[in-house]
């Protein structure tokens, strides 16, 4: 699967099938995306391959446990890496060229879900991290 930022400067390829796809309703995701929630999926770190625009990628730490990357030209969010799961990396599903097959299956940080936004599903909803999240 392939994907990239809105302006086309950054392009990436997934070297394996993404897993653990879910919605995040945290305030950082809301502010970074300008949207009520972000849908993320996960691959092993080495399987998120930057194919173009690596010198255009910015990095920012917005929590004490993770770092986000973004396209420094257009601002599109690209990845989240968290200290408690160092062997994997998360990416916003909507940046895939074909997001349809990568469907979410859970919600996290619903404690900060915006009141007028919800999705039509019965997936597990967690107020913060999932209970089985390692290291937290
Ligand atoms: Zn861009
Ligand atoms: Zn979030």
Image: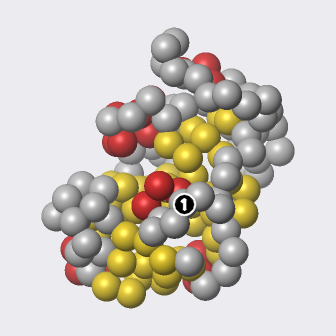
Q: Residue at x 58, y 23 (%)?
A: 118
Residue 98: in sight, yes or no? yes
Q: Residue furthest left?
A: 73
State which quadrant residue 45 falls in.
bottom right
Question: In the image, is 107 to the left or to the right of 50?
Answer: right
Image quadrant holding the N terminus, namely bottom right
* Position of residue 107 measured from the top left corner of the image (x, y, whole percent): 68, 35
The colour scheme of the drawn protein is: secondary structure
Q: Can you tell me whether the CB of the residue at mark 1 lies under 8 Å from the nearest atom of ligand 1?
A: no
Image quadrant holding the C terminus, namely top right
Question: In the image, is 79 to the left or to the right of 70?
Answer: right
Q: Residues within 10 Å of mark 1 (few under 14, many from 20)?
A: some
At numbered mark 1, what does the secondary structure look like: helix, strand or loop? Answer: loop
Please name whichever residue, 47 or 102, is drawn nearer the observer in this view of the structure: 102
* Position of residue 59 measured from the top left corner of the image (x, y, whole percent): 32, 62
Residue 79: in sight, yes or no? no
State which quadrant residue 17 falls in.
bottom right
Question: In the image, is 27 to the left or to the right of 45?
Answer: left
Q: Residue at x 28, y 61 (%)?
A: 6
* Position of residue 80 measured from the top left corner of the image (x, y, whole percent): 49, 57
Q: Is residue 117 above or below residue 49?
A: above
Q: Which residue is mark 1?
A: 99
């Amino acid at each position: 699967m392939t994907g990239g930022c809105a302006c086309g400067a950054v392009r990436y390829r997934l070297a394996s099938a993404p897993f653990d796809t879910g919605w995040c309703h945290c305030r950082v995701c809301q502010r970074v995306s300008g949207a009520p929630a972000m849908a993320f999926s996960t691959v092993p770190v080495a399987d998120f391959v930057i194919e173009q625009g690596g010198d255009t990628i910015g990095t920012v730490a917005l929590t004490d446990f993770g770092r986000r990357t973004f396209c420094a030209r257009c601002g599109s969010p690209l990845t989240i890496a968290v200290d408690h799961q160092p062997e994997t990396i998360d990416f916003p599903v909507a940046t895939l060229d074909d997001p349809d097959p990568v469907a979410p299956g859970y919600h996290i940080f619903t404690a900060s879900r915006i009141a007028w936004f919800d999705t039509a599903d019965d997936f597990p909803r967690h107020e913060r991290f999932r209970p089985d999240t390692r290291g937290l």
